[in-house]
Image: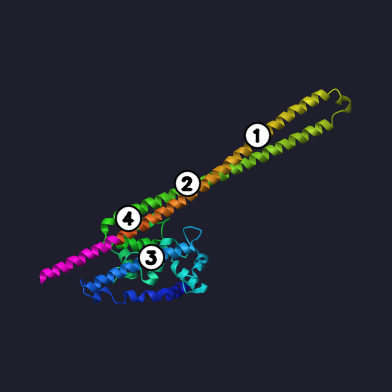
Amino acid sequence: MAGRRRGRELLGEGRGSPRAGGRGQQAAGSPRAGRGEAAASSVQQEMLEKARDLFQLCDKEEKGFITKRDMQRLQNELPLTPEQLEDVFDSLDQDTNGYLTPLEFSMGLGRFIGVEVLPEPEGSDSSVLEDTFVSGGWEEDLSLLEDMLCVFLSQSEVRELWARLRRDRPELLSNFEALLSKVSTHIQEVNLEKDSMEQALRRRECDHDREVRSLYEEMEHQITIEKDRLLNQDSLRQSDKSLQLQSELRMRERELEGIVGRQKQLESQLHELSYEQVETRVQNERLRHTNKDLQDQLERSTRELETAQRHLRQLQEQASREQRQKDR
């Protein structure tokens, strides 16, 4: 908690000035207000692009997330010491899971410097947002949303987006929930399938090891018995039984060849199992990329929603100006 406060103090200098004036201090239809909103939108876009650039600079391995150690790569980009960068990371890591996703990084950094992924209406704060979730008879819908997000983004981020959609654009809420449900179900199915395949592979490896050990023990036991029997043969009967013993030895050699052949077959099966394991890893990697694409799709949907909201505000301002002109 202390690290988060220090991170907010380090980056908090950039968030006071853009909101200090407030939109209520200017006339709604004045040219100065329009220029201010356009400038704010431009600054917001630039800051979000800067946040993405900083994340890519940290994530050189393209893991899809960054750790506290990756954060140190920003020493040449930001005027912060290593200790201050660690404090910033702790303040952005709201889930305290030790890593940041692109969305967590962009949203968290945006909140510090006064740029939000979705613009907040005037007078709204975290307490108002929390009151929205605990009142109004939405408990059943909220429980369903939490189930959908069990393997997705942090609940605080998606709750905030969900509340704003419900408040500002309710017609988009069903599409948003359907998208989250499909993504969550897909990720859960992939994880279950991966666990099942890994367990089956481990069971097959254990069975193979036991079978190989059993064959080796049986072979060694048979060879030991045969040697003892031959050594204990009566010397007087050795010459008479020589041909018979040679025949028996050849038979044992054939049996041994059969056992060796079985061993090679089992080794071949083991190679096939190893190949299947590699295929499983490749498939998991594909699934990871698919998950990343779905997250990118969610970010694009969020940006489209912001554009729609800005357009709606412009239409409202235009209608207000036309109404004032009619009143004159």
Q: CA distance from mark 2 to mark 1?
A: 32 Å
Residue located 31% across and 77% down the image = 20
Q: In the rendering, at what x and y percent does residue 115 appear?
A: 36, 69
Q: Earlier in the sequence, mark 1 or mark 3?
A: 3
Mark 1–mark 3 contact, CB under 8 Å? no
Mark closer to the chain start, 2 or 3: 3
- Side of 251 relative to 39 (left or right): right
Q: Is residue 294 above or below residue 265?
A: below
Q: Which residues are magenta?
A: 307-328
Q: Inspect this view and state whether residue 153 appears.
A: yes
Residue 230 vs residue 29, the one in the foreground: 29
Give the quarter of the figure containing the C terminus. bottom left
Can residue 147 be seen from the camera position used here?
no
- Which residue is drawn at the image coordinates 36% and 71% (left, top)? 114
Q: Quadrant of residue 205?
A: top right
Question: Which secondary structure lies at badge 1?
Answer: helix
Q: Earlier in the sequence, mark 2 or mark 4?
A: 4
Q: Is residue 325 magenta?
A: yes
Q: Position of residue 280 (x, y in %)?
A: 52, 46
Residue tagged 3: 48
Q: Which mark is residue 176?
A: 4
Mark 1 or 3: in front is: 3
**Circle 2: element type:** helix
**How busy is the neighbourhood of tag 2: few (under 14 within 10 Å), some, or many (20 plus)?**
few
Residue at image mark 1: 262
Percent across and percent down for residue 84 are 49, 74
Q: Residues within 10 Å of mark 1 (few under 14, many from 20)?
A: some
